[in-house]
Amino acid sequence: MSTDPLVVFTPSGKRGRFPKGTPVLTAARQLGVDLDSVCGGRGICSKCQISPGYGEFSKHGVTVHQDALSEWNAVEERYDQKRGLKPGRRLGCQAQIMGDVVIDVPPESQVHKQVVRKAASARVIEMDPATRLYFVEVEEADMHEPTGDFERLQRALKAQWEIDNIRADLSLLAKLQPVLRKGKFQVTVALHRGHAETPAQVLEIWPGLHEGGLFGLAIDLGSTTVAAHLTDLETGEVKASSGIMNPQIRFGEDLMSRVSYAMMNPGGDREMTAAVRDAINTLAEEIAKEAGIDAKLIVETVFVCNPVMHHLLLGIDPVELGQAPFALATSGSMALNARELDLVAINPRAQIYVLPCIAGHVGADAAAVALSEEPGKSEDLALIVDVGTNAEILLGDKTRVLACSSPTGPAFEGAQISSGQRAAPGAIEAIRIDPMTKEPRFRVIGSDIWSDEDGFEAAVGDGGITGICGSGIIEAVAEMRMAGLLDESGLIGSSEATGTARMIEDGRTHSYVIHDGSAKGGPVITVTQGDIRAIQLAKSALYAGARLLMDERGVDKVDRVVLAGAFGAHISPLHAMVLGMIPDVPLDKVTSAGNAAGTGARIALCNVAARREIERVVGQITKVETAIEPKFQEHFVAANAIPHKTDPFPELSKIVTLPNPSFNTHGDGSDGGRRKRRRG
Amino acid sequence: MSTDPLVVFTPSGKRGRFPKGTPVLTAARQLGVDLDSVCGGRGICSKCQISPGYGEFSKHGVTVHQDALSEWNAVEERYDQKRGLKPGRRLGCQAQIMGDVVIDVPPESQVHKQVVRKAASARVIEMDPATRLYFVEVEEADMHEPTGDFERLQRALKAQWEIDNIRADLSLLAKLQPVLRKGKFQVTVALHRGHAETPAQVLEIWPGLHEGGLFGLAIDLGSTTVAAHLTDLETGEVKASSGIMNPQIRFGEDLMSRVSYAMMNPGGDREMTAAVRDAINTLAEEIAKEAGIDAKLIVETVFVCNPVMHHLLLGIDPVELGQAPFALATSGSMALNARELDLVAINPRAQIYVLPCIAGHVGADAAAVALSEEPGKSEDLALIVDVGTNAEILLGDKTRVLACSSPTGPAFEGAQISSGQRAAPGAIEAIRIDPMTKEPRFRVIGSDIWSDEDGFEAAVGDGGITGICGSGIIEAVAEMRMAGLLDESGLIGSSEATGTARMIEDGRTHSYVIHDGSAKGGPVITVTQGDIRAIQLAKSALYAGARLLMDERGVDKVDRVVLAGAFGAHISPLHAMVLGMIPDVPLDKVTSAGNAAGTGARIALCNVAARREIERVVGQITKVETAIEPKFQEHFVAANAIPHKTDPFPELSKIVTLPNPSFNTHGDGSDGGRRKRRRG
């Protein structure tokens, strides 16, 4: 009496006995082993490559003989000659099980590939895209059984792939008949499956086996820039990343000025919608060109954006977002197609997914951060801050997540700062001030050399030193505070009071000269009292938002802080804490998440289950509206001091002792300008 | 101990006891009584009007006192003053049950109104349209509960109407916020519910209560004409009917010449698609104007058409329909929106339903005939013939339904006939030939007076007698056969052989002069041998198709014949049978169904369940392809004789004795021209 051969798959460990002659792909499917196949076992797509192992496998209790699999067959020979199989590889649909065998499924043969994210976090994205390729053989048309070609395609997908309930739009139906006949009734279809309850949609069809790949765009649609990652929907690989300025800037630098533009100019919202859609088309064309692919192979696009950009992208007048109660037209996720958004550059049937918004001020970008950083799965209490013109703030752990946005203004991006500029070569991005000599040294973008080191001037080059970017100004203010050039209230001391000639008078206030390039025709880069005030307003808003969430949660400290956003990656945790931007935590508990919103978009692009997940999570997030919360004003005022008027910063105290000068010459502990603001 | 009052609703007979003070609408809903309401019981829509009955109702065992319902309240007073309530009517949402009562629900207050069809058949259409109006009060936006306006609309529809799972496209979302605010968060929505498994879609939204009605178009898209019925989706009333020529005629008179045009001219299919869509827009605008409504209130359109028009409407190249195996791109029903078909004249979110096709030659128009005439529910075996350039033929009863189409050509429409013309004033539509004198008398369209009666010339008027239309030529040929002017084989006898001077020589053949208008500058109207041949080809094709279905069914007679199509209504059953167009049945078993395809479209427009029904029925119909069936040729040849070479016509024999001359002078029982055709 003989027993059927035992097959053990690795890395899954799944095992079972199969009759001799069973193809490996068949065994894998029956055991639920994740082995890819586009052609359905016809030996033409090569996606089901496997590596048999031979010899003793004591771990599995198996001895594998050289004849455990059938001999190479003609299909494998042909494939190897044409494309080349890696040594030791077989085609899973051709190799038949003849004896006990251990079979490894290499990562590239898995459908649910694990893609390591580029970002700092080690989390992986499991590939489970909404759109996949399927090769099918369709019955030829038969007068005696007069069904439509599409109905026979449906039948083939059901019989060969067990996929029921598919549909196609008119533009696909219009090309169906010639493609079917060109492929001799063998075709590859790109099938999109969104929500489980809706029919799968045929997005594209190719004669024969399509080997040109399938791509998606993850787009982070910001107020200032539109950033896209072109992603291979089969492997998860990012083929190209590119950005473009948001052309809406000409209608208004910040969101509220764009809302005003829409309010003041009839049709202004439509102008802005057309502008941003144009830009997305340009971006899609450019990024496809960069990656060397046909833009029509882009069959999916995921958008994350703030609520105003969300409405302007969708063609909805954002006017309600400019006034209380900040009502969104819709907050749910959106499933659209390319035509609805005039995205003519990509596949006309491409499917669009827009992440849900959290609230009128907390958009799909914040939802994407929640998807990427998963505060709702955190064991400890995490504060996640996405720093931009508006800061999106999330606070939470496994028990509960809260969210708000806070109007920090553009100071952190270098705007409204006397020597401020965008992060670009020539901008000071890091600075240190000697507490004894009060002398600064700094580094500019584009060079790793500090200004007091040899070779600095050469490294900076002809462009010279042009200004201070966002991270630079944060460090400058924090260093001035640590060096005793600035008191707790934010007043800059005079040259006499601070003992440095770098302090120059500026009307009734003082400015600190970081760099004087005037001898070479360059700028004099200073930090003025106005700069300090702008940074104080921004950091107070940020801190007050975080505190409001902490109040709501009933805590006065958090376990860790995550700085998200491209800008967040460049902020020095120590300086952020000296400034009082973020609550007091041990320095090693401050991490950067990179562009978490963009990562969230990429996760939603590559994994359809993640879309359901974030829709669920967003419904459970507690929304806190900073604009109407009286305590926000209170927190804002108290957070004006550097680092804070009342909150202790015990962790910060362990590593830094801040000097405690007072440069107030009016004797009232304040100054007119700030007081006015506090009452506002 | 008191008992709750008993309420009996008529005509349903539903009854139940309810606590005093229960509004009648509430009781009706709990009992499942069909009582309409758009405003949901707010006393503003007046759709829930009821008529209480007072006195003894021995049938129901109830005595109704004058105080059985609550007194008129302020809402009813206001409504009555503003709009007027019919005597004895109450608003069901306002009147409360105070004692035993019998309540009649008048037809106009029923949701599922029964609409009597205009056509001959007495069948009624039950109103159950896919799109209905709902008045809802939406919660106002609240900063503390930041959901989107659309999400609050969803919630309101769920709470107030128990409707779950709704969606809206971007164009609706773009108008949602201003409309909600204009209506102070009270709005009426038009909600479309198609297939049960898909979400309901908001097609339109109005501030407050919308009282402007809701309309749909039932369109019969023919090769020659496009006919539309504008229907009130609340009452089922046809507000206007209108037709327009199909502008595709300039690309080809019949379907196959249009298919050829598409094959010969790259982009020709797109030209034809654009032309027909333009025409539909024009028709929609005209019909709305005629009915005095805003065309944007047209929120649904149902199309029925033959397969070639189906593809050209949908923007699919019909080339495959011009050659075996006549593969449709898709045969299933289609749910589309107005934008996909460029129907810009109607509501941009209007929903389009296209009935399923039966086979490559048997279209959605035949499906509509099946929906209207319901052969599958017939107790006796019915043959349904929709006569046109192609004849669609259905044969069936409760056990089984078969369908085919047969290429009759345009002869029945007066084309390819020497004196033929379309049915229009001046065309001879009826003719009788005296068997003794061989003299004709006739009637023309536009007048009821026969040509041998007084006042005929005056009645015909200045336009004169211009030609013969389809029904006229059928009668002319049949009458010639009955008068002995034509033999069984279709040969016209000479003047000598027939004994009438009206027979004139025409080369080697003869023509019969019906009317000589040349003295007044009018035409000489004759029936030529060529005309006879054209009619023979057409009728043979029709009869052969019917016989093929009878073969398939295993019968050699049918119980009844239904002539459908606008043309079918004008055919004289006797003459059709003398000609051998239709199988032999008692004359009173030949009925006309009018424009059954158009009626089918109207049924599908007014009753969403009928769509599911016809989809199911079409799947069960046995399709017979005439083009490949060898027996079709056989039947075609045998049917060339008038009435038939081999089939007996016993029912016809009971009422008509046909003379049996033979005008064959060649001695071979045939003539060259016909033989050639037979072999083709």
Image (cartoon, coloured by chain):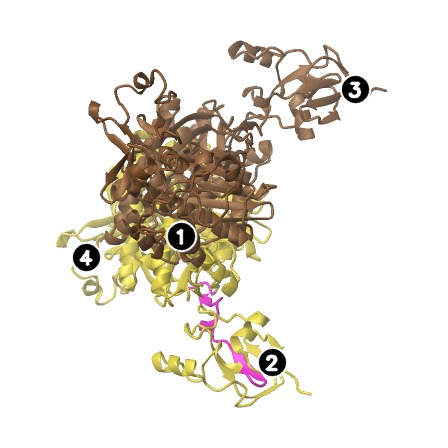
Chain colours: A brown, B yellow
Please name the amino acid that badge 2 sits on: Pro
- Along the horizontal axis of the image, is B662 left or right of B651? left
Q: Position of residue A222 (x, y in %)?
A: 37, 39
The alpha-carbon separation of the residues under discs 1 and 2 comes to 61 Å
Element type where label 3 sits in the image: loop
Q: In the rendered structure, the residue with mark 2 lies on which chain? A: B
Q: Position of residue B389 (x, y in %)?
A: 36, 45
Please name the amino acid that badge 4 sits on: Gly
The alpha-carbon separation of the residues under discs 4 and 2 comes to 75 Å
The answer to whether residue A441 of the structure is visible from this angle is yes
For the residues beneath circles 3 and 2, the answer to whether they share a chain is no
Q: Counting other residues with Cα less than 10 Å from the Cα at mark 1, is it few (<14), some (14-19), or many (20 or more)?
A: many
Q: In the rendered structure, the residue with mark 3 lies on which chain? A: A
State which mark lies toward you, 4 or 1. Answer: 1
Q: Counting other residues with Cα less than 10 Å from the Cα at mark 4, is it few (<14), some (14-19), or many (20 or more)?
A: some
Check whether the beta carbons of the residues at disc 4 and disc 2 lie within 8 A of each other: no
The alpha-carbon separation of the residues under discs 4 and 3 comes to 103 Å
Task: Give the residue number, with chain letter if any, for mark 1.
Answer: A637
Element type where label 4 sits in the image: loop
Task: Give the residue number, with chain letter if any, for mark 3.
Answer: A61
Q: Position of residue B490 (x, y in %)?
A: 37, 43
Q: In the rendered structure, the residue with mark 1 lies on which chain? A: A
Task: Give the residue number, with chain letter if any, for mark 4.
Answer: B464
| Residue at image coords 24%, 53% | A264
| Residue at image coords 71%, 12% | A54
